[in-house]
């Protein structure tokens, strides 16, 4: 389980998160909704260890172990994964090389042959053409293709907890359906997910176990799937 306890975060002198408490259990789907600027992406970045943010107080626990002082790579080894809202482009570095390097860093050594086998299996599962893996990471990718690359990383690394920051943004309905089915499959295998979103269209496929609403750096309401429907119909009050 990932547990956030009384977390307050600063950017410079400005406080962005205020006393956040949130659990993300393995094998469950937790959804975080909220208007732009409410602090959702900040929370995901802080959990992953982005050094641009300063933790004023609170704890980030993974399987009851404090990870606040660990580097992002060490947190990844503990089983935390972050899918970025706006993935960076890395010209000249193929997606395959990035994925294999990440796999070795998180899971340990693997032969080129064995990794190729895993990669082809995951690409087939996600309906991604094999030529996609030879392209430079995110260079010239459409919004939907960037989301495919992020989802492929998730499938290959198989984390304990996935932080999915607006995975539904820039993806069409067919792509979302494939993503949703794969997230459901990984949930059945024990993965927990924190899905950050403005909308409920992903939630038509991935049914949440817990829903939280963030506003002005605070969690202001918590509930089940009905809360997501209420927000979709009436907005953030």
Image: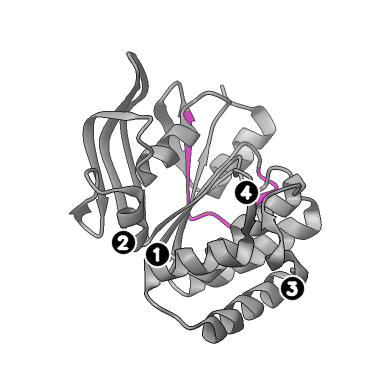
Callout 3 secondary element: helix
Magenta-colored span: 200-214
User: Dot 4: what SS?
Assistant: loop
Q: Earlier in the sequence, mark 4 or mark 1?
A: 1
Q: Which mark is residue 78?
A: 2
Q: Position of residue 237 (x, y in %)?
A: 56, 21
Q: Which of pointers 3 and 1 lies earlier in the amino acid sequence? A: 3
> In front here: 3 or 51?
51
Can you see residue 37?
A: yes
Q: Residue 99 location in percent, x, y?
A: 54, 65
According to the picture, the residue beneath numbered tag 1 turns out to be 160
In the picture, residue 15 is in which quadrant?
top left
Which residue is outermost to the top? 13
Compared across the picture, whether 76 is left or right of 139 comes to: left
Between circles 4 and 2, the one closer to the viewer is 2
Label 3 belongs to which residue?
Answer: 130
Q: Residues within 10 Å of mark 4 (few under 14, many from 20)?
A: many
Residues at marks 2 and 1 touching, judged by CB atoms closer than 8 Å? yes
217 falls in the magenta region: no
Can residue 158 be seen by looking at this rendering? no
Question: What is the CA distance from the residue labelled 2 to the residue labelled 3?
Answer: 29 Å
Marks 3 and 1 close (CB-CB < 8 Å)? no
Q: CA distance from mark 4 to mark 3?
A: 21 Å
Q: Is residue 96 left or right of residue 124?
A: left
């Amino acid at each position: 389980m990932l547990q956030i306890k009384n977390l307050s975060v600063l950017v410079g002198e400005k406080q962005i998160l205020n006393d956040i408490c949130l659990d993300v259990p393995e094998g469950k789907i937790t959804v975080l909704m909220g208007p732009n600027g409410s602090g959702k992406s900040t929370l995901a970045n802080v959990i992953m260890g982005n050094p641009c943010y300063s933790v004023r107080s609170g704890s980030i626990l993974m399987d009851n172990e404090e990870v606040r002082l660990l580097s992002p790579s060490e947190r990844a080894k503990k089983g935390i994964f972050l899918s970025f809202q706006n993935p960076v482009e890395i010209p000249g570095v193929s997606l395959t090389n990035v994925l294999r390097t990440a796999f070795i860093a998180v899971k340990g050594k693997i032969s080129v042959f064995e990794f190729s086998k895993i990669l082809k299996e995951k690409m087939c599962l996600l309906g991604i053409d094999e030529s996609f893996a030879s392209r430079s990471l995110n260079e010239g990718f459409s919004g939907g293709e960037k989301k495919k690359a992020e989802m492929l990383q998730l499938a290959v690394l198989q984390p304990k907890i996935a932080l999915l920051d607006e995975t539904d943004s820039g993806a069409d309905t067919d792509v979302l359906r494939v993503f949703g089915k794969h997230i459901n499959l990984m949930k059945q295998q024990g993965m927990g997910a924190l899905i950050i979103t403005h909308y409920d269209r992903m939630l038509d496929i991935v049914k949440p176990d817990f829903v939280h609403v963030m506003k002005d750096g605070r969690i202001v309401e918590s509930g089940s799937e009905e809360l997501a429907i209420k927000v979709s119909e009436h907005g953030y009050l």
